[in-house]
Image (cartoon, grey):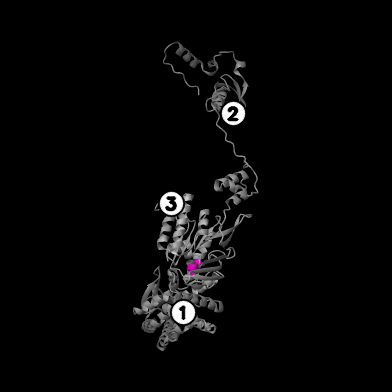
């Protein structure tokens, strides 16, 4: 089955849930690769396995399965002739324990005469190997009692170590004045005495180490060293015996490998089967009946990924004289969910899974084909309509009398008249193919075509005109009516506007067939923000003539009296003469005190006030003759 179809129908999400219910890596991988069964007997066998697995889980609880990928690695090491570690042997033992528990679980299922329970006969417990590992390996190490020889050697080691310690402590007690401490210590695996440097010649033995200051020497006494040599020989013997036991157990595992592999394969196979039973329980699914007579009947079907408390059950039936169903109705009415629900349940059934229906009779299909969503392909620069037509042509090239086809929004994405024509042409091609098909559309002309065409019926998704909510019920045999005018009326569109809309859509005569609750003639206008224009030149002129040179003004917030020496510029700033200085100031901080016309005669020379005597003289000379003098700024 095409991966793209799996994704569009959301079977990939069902697989994801299903995968998480498996334990072994092999079963998880098999779930990801699961595809349709085309043999009726094979499909019925797989469905029966799913039913039996669910039954056993409900009666006996979850089966004792574990991930066994690590054991395969252990067996590969044994096959190379390498020695297995105690840890690896313990892993083998745990799997053998798990196999025993699984066999016991299946044997308990025999009282129900469940066919899966009889797989217990194919499980070999390998009891000898399990007991051998259990006896010889404990807590990640070879046990002291794994063999009589190992038990003897380890007792000798303990005895030798005790003698070494006693001898060293005896020397320590009899030479206290020579010792830096009153206890023995280990250095480089040897038992040593902490001897003061000055007494090194008093203690016979080998210097093994010294303190960081050099004042203390760690000496192994000569009488202790002979025990050390004996201890090393014992440890070599112990190591040889441990390896002998591990190699013996490794050889036992290798000899049991073929049977162990068969056990593992059966455990993986059962894990796959039981994962289907777990999925059936989780989704509250049921076993469908399978037919090859091109008949699909679903009672109270729901989308497996939707909350069962929210999903509205779907009643669906097709087959016999009816091969095609055209579903119409408003947007958000559940048309797409309905056709996905039908196909997804059919795919699940043909993959050996239970379906989310109260009861289902499903035919086997040679292919599942669909065109859902806008399918926009930006990388290939295809428009919605182009992508839609490309998908449709792919579907039509593959479709045959044993196919199940679903198409959403048939003929959408282009001019309505042309789209309607294309929709009818596609339907006619599907009808000729003999396939079972479900399509959704908005075009009223397509409803008329479906009414007249052989093998095709209309269906509609119901819609509550009062609450403006879809009820998600599919009614086969009735065409869906347009709810656009009712929705617009309910939401407050004025009657006059609705009349214009109906006339444009269906002509003058159709207006009388509608009755509206909203009688308003016009849409009530809401208040909106006002746009304020920028001030024109007139205001600028008023501003620049507001203060004249010579006006006496009050300067805020200091409340000082000054005289205007330069009028307001385009930025709204003027210059004021204050005692001993001139300042630039915004006109908003200035208030007229006495106008210049009241203080000075007409044509008064204000340079007398605002310029120094020197600058006035220079300006007077410039007006009479050429001069090199410069008027200095009085900032």
Q: Is the residue 275 above or below the residue 616 in the image?
A: below
Relative to 198, 524 lies left or right: right
Q: Nearer the viewer, mark 2 or mark 1?
A: 1
Pick the residue in front: 328 or 276: 328
Q: Is the residue 366 above or below the residue 501 in the image?
A: below
Q: Earlier in the sequence, mark 3 or mark 2?
A: 3
Pick the residue in front: 360 or 453: 453
Give coordinates of residue 271: x percent, y percent. Answer: 47, 75
Q: Is the residue 515 above or below the residue 457 in the image?
A: above
Q: In which quarter of the image is the N terminus?
A: bottom left
Category of crowding for the residue at label 2, using alpha-carbon neighbours closer than 10 angstroms: few (below 14), some (14–19), many (at least 20): few
Prevalent SS, magenta region: helix
Residue 412 is at least partly visible in this image: no
Q: Earlier in the sequence, mark 3 or mark 1?
A: 1
Pick the residue in front: 123 or 138: 123
Residue at the spot of label 2: 588
Task: Give the residue at x 46% y 70%.
Answer: 364
Q: Nearer the viewer, mark 3 or mark 1?
A: 3
Give coordinates of residue 42: x percent, y percent. Answer: 44, 76
Residue at the spot of label 3: 383
Q: What stretch is highlighted in magenta?
A: 344-348
Q: Farthest residue in the left direction?
A: 80
Residue at the spot of label 1: 94
Category of crowding for the residue at label 3, using alpha-carbon neighbours closer than 10 angstroms: few (below 14), some (14–19), many (at least 20): some
Q: Which of marks 2 and 1 is nearer the N terminus?
A: 1
| For the residues bearing labels 3 and 2, Cβ distance under 8 angstroms | no
Rendered image quadrant of residue 241: bottom left
Category of crowding for the residue at label 1, using alpha-carbon neighbours closer than 10 angstroms: few (below 14), some (14–19), many (at least 20): some
């Amino acid at each position: 089955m095409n991966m793209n179809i799996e994704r569009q129908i959301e079977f990939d999400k069902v697989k994801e849930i299903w995968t998480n219910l498996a334990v072994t890596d092999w079963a998880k991988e098999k779930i990801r690769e699961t595809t349709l069964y085309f043999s009726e007997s094979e499909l019925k066998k797989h469905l029966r396995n799913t039913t039996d697995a669910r039954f056993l889980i409900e009666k006996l609880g979850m089966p004792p399965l574990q991930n066994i990928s690590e054991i395969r690695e252990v067996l590969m090491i044994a096959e190379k002739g390498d020695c297995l570690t105690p840890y690896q042997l313990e892993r083998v033992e745990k799997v053998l324990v798990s196999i025993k528990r699984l066999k016991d679980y299946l044997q308990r299922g025999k009282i129900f005469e469940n066919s899966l329970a009889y797989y217990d006969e194919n499980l070999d417990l390998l009891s000898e190997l399990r007991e051998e590992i259990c006896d010889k390996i404990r807590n990640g190490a070879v046990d002291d009692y794994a063999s009589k020889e190992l038990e003897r050697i380890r007792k000798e080691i303990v005895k030798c170590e005790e003698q070494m310690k006693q001898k060293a402590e005896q020397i320590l007690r009899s030479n206290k004045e020579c010792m830096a401490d009153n206890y023995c210590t280990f250095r480089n695996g040897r038992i040593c005495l902490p001897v003061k440097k000055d007494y090194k010649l008093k203690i016979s033995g080998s210097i093994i180490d010294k303190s960081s200051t050099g004042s203390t020497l760690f000496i192994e006494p000569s009488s202790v060293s002979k025990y050390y040599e004996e201890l090393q020989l014992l440890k070599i013997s112990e190591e040889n015996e441990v390896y002998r036991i591990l190699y013996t157990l490794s050889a036992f595992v290798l000899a049991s490998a073929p049977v162990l592999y068969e056990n593992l394969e059966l455990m993986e196979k059962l894990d796959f089967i039981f994962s289907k039973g777990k999925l059936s329980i989780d989704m509250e699914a049921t076993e469908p009946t399978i037919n090859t007579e091109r008949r699909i009947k679903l009672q109270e079907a729901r989308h497996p990924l939707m909350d069962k408390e929210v999903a509205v059950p779907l009643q669906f039936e097709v087959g016999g004289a009816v091969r095609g169903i055209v579903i119409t109705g408003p947007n958000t009415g559940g048309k797409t969910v309905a056709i996905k629900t039908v196909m997804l349940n059919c795919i699940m059934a043909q993959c050996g899974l239970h379906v989310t229906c109260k009861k289902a009779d499903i035919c086997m299909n040679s292919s599942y084909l669909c065109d859902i969503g806008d399918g926009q392909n930006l990388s290939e620069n295809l428009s919605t309509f182009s992508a839609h037509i490309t998908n449709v042509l792919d579907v039509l090239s593959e479709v045959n009398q044993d196919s199940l086809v679903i198409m959403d929004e048939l003929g959408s994405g282009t001019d309505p008249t042309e789209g309607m024509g294309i929709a009818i042409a596609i339907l006619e091609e599907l009808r000729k193919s003999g396939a079972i098909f479900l399509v959704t559309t908005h075009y009223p002309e397509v409803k008329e075509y479906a009414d007249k065409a052989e093998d095709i019926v209309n269906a509609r998704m119901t819609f509550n005109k009062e609450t403006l909510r879809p009820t998600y019920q599919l009614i086969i045999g009735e065409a869906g009516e347009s709810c656009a005018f009712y929705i617009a009326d309910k939401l407050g569109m004025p009657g006059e506007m609705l009349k214009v809309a109906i006339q444009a859509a269906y002509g003058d005569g159709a207006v009388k067939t509608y009755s509206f609750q909203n009688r308003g003639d016009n849409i009530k206008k809401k208040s909106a923000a006002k746009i304020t224009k920028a001030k024109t030149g007139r205001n600028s002129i008023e501003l620049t003539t507001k203060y004249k040179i010579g006006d006496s003004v009050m300067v805020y917030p200091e409340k000082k009296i000054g005289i205007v020496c330069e009028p307001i510029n385009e930025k709204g700033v003027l210059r004021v003469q204050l005692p001993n200085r001139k300042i630039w100031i915004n006109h908003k901080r200035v208030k007229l005190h006495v106008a210049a016309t009241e203080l000075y005669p007409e044509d008064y020379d204000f340079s007398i006030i605002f310029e120094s005597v020197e600058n006035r003289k220079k300006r007077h000379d410039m007006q009479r003759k050429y001069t090199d003098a410069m008027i200095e700024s009085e900032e």
